[in-house]
Amino acid sequence: RYCFATWAYHANDRLGRGGKLVQVGIRASGHPRAHWESTLDVRQHWADEVEGRDPFDLAREIVEHLKARGVEGLYVSNDIDGTDPAFAASTGTPEPGGLSPELVATLIREVGGAFACWGSDLVEVAPPLAGEVDGEPQRTLRTSVRYLAEQIRLGRRA
C-alpha cells in the first residue's frame, strides 16, 4: 500500500486527481500510458516523446495544462533517474533514453516559475552506486547541483 513507488499515486489522490499530477520522462511502466491517464487522470509526457522537443514549448504546454485545471502552486519532485545516464549514472535505476539536463532544468525553471513553488526535492542521487563508470559520481553530482540550483531559485521567487 505504501512504499517508495506509491508516492505519486497517493499525491494524485490528495490532489483530487483532475489531471493535476504531471509526470515527465517516463521510460518504463507496468501499465500503458492510457491506463494512467484514463484511470487515474495523470498527465504523462514519456521520455521518447519529449526528448528533442523545444523545452520551452513543452514547458508552455504543461503550464497551460495546469492553469486550465486551476493549479496555483506546485511541489516539484525530480527523480534523477529520469535523466539520461550519460549525465547521471549514479542512481538507483540508470536507464538509457532519459532526459537531458537542459530539458529538465528548463522545465524546473519555466514550469516552476509560473506558479508559487511550495517545495521541491531531488531523489535517487546515489554516489555509492557509481561503480567503475568513467566520470562518476562527479557527473551525477554536477547534474544534481544544476537541478538543485534551479529548485532553490524557485523558492526565492515564491
Image: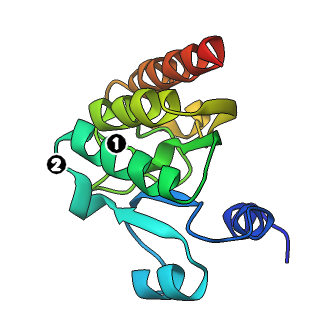
Residues 139 and 144: in front is 144
Which residue is identified by label 1? 59
Q: How is the image coloured?
A: rainbow
Q: Position of residue 84 (x, y in %)?
A: 32, 45
Q: Position of residue 28 (x, y in %)?
A: 41, 72
- The answer to which image quadrant residue 136 occupies is top left
Considering the numbered disc 2 on the image, is that residue within a helix, a strand or a loop? loop
Q: Residues within 10 Å of mark 1 (few under 14, many from 20)?
A: many
Instruction: Give the residue at x 47% y 48%.
Output: 81
- The answer to which image quadrant residue 75 occupies is top right
Q: Amino acid at mark 2?
A: Arg
Q: Upstream in the sequence, badge 2 or badge 1?
A: 2
Q: Amino acid at mark 1?
A: Ala
**Above or below for 30 versus 96:** below
**Above or below for 57 versus 23:** above
Instruction: Give the residue at x 36% y 62%.
Output: 45
| 158 relative position to 42: left or right | right
Which residue is identified by label 2? 53
Report if the CB atoms under discs 2 and 1 are less than 8 Å apart.
no
Residues 135 and 118: in front is 118
